[in-house]
Image (spheres, helix red, strand yellow):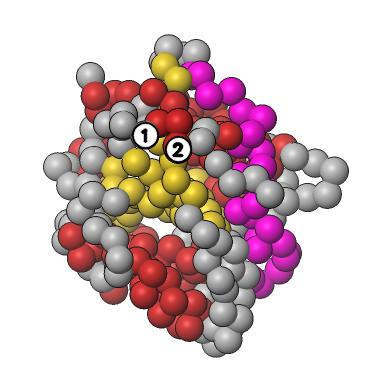
Amino acid sequence: MYIHFFDLDPDEKQGQALPLIYVWPVPYQGTVSFGYGTKDGPEAILKASYQIETYDARLDVDIEDLCHFITLPFQRTNVAGPEYLYQDMENFLSRFDPKKDFFLTLGGEHSISFPLFKFYTRAFQELVILQIDAHADLRQEYEGSRFSHACIMARARELGLRIVQIGIRSLCQFEAEYIKKHQGHDLLTFFAWDLPDPVHTARICREFIGQNPVYISFDVDGLDPAIMPGTGTPEPGGINYNWLSELWFNFWPGPKLVGMDICELAPQPYNVVSESVAVKCIFNILTNYLKKQQE
Ligand SMILES: [Mn+2]
């Protein structure tokens, strides 16, 4: 069993005043519509993290000098439906403080984000969700569920949250019209087919977000399936790795990051590309944020 993220034992860091990150595995797979396997995502990410270098050569910093990680017990998942899972997740989260506790939640399918949105909204009314995704996830309901992975951002909107979406390329007509109506006001959607360069994109995002804090909700299918084949609903034409790394490099110093999740990883047999890419994406976000917010 692989427990310590990046193979970093938190006990070795005791006494050092480093930011703490709770790694919370939530292997939920209840409403997936096509490919299966997201329940194995958290374990694959933890395992792949043991193989990833903890030194960030571009930033000249080791992640172990920026933060320490505590991996929480795997969330038991209730297959009766997302509403039941949400109740369990909210009960668990009630012991934590949204003002200071940073959760890195490992999905599971994308529906697991909703309790985290609610958790952080309690402390930060003006929270902005930064969503990496191929899908807009703005449907009112999907296959009979309002809490399907395909509706998660519609639920975020009901909490009054503003959203930045990056990499979107698969949506229904309702969602297209919704985006047109809200674009630039309380929603900022970057479609995959006309992404500006990452420096420019980072600037537009920061202007939209202003002084407000951010929560990153990262559906791995936002990435191109060439580098992320292990996901339930792969969509060609996605974000490439260097573009995204450059985005984070230019995004900070900038908004406060309160927490993040990474979802929809469905590991493939005999191919560790997907989970390795997922770990590197998490790594880039954390090193850029933690290093540059300190400077
Ligand atoms: Mn998606």
Q: Which residue is mark 2?
A: 10
Instruction: Verify whether residue 170 appears in magenta.
Output: no
* Residue at the spot of label 1: 14
Residue 120 position (above or below residue 218): below
Residue 209 location (% of width, % of height): 22, 45
**The C terminus lies in quadrant:** top left
Report the side of 23 relative to 99 (left or right). right
- Local packing at callout 1 (Cα closer than 10 Å; few below 14, some 14-19, many 20+) is few
Seen in the picture, residue 201 relative to 155 is either above or below; the reply is above
Q: Secondary structure at mark 2?
A: helix
Residue at point 18% right, 60% down? 123
Question: Is residue 225 in view from this perspective?
Answer: no
User: Which of the 4 quarters of the picture holds residue 208?
Assistant: top left
Residue 51 inside the magenta-drawn segment:
yes
Q: CA distance from mark 2 to mark 1?
A: 7 Å
Image marks 2 and 1: residues in contact by CB distance under 8 Å: yes
**Residue at the (66%, 72%) spot, across then down:** 33
Residue 53 in the image, given as x and y percentages of width and height? 59, 23
User: What secondary structure is marked by label 1?
Assistant: loop
Foreground: 20 or 294?
20
Amino acid under disc 1: Gln
Q: Which residues are magenta?
A: 32-56
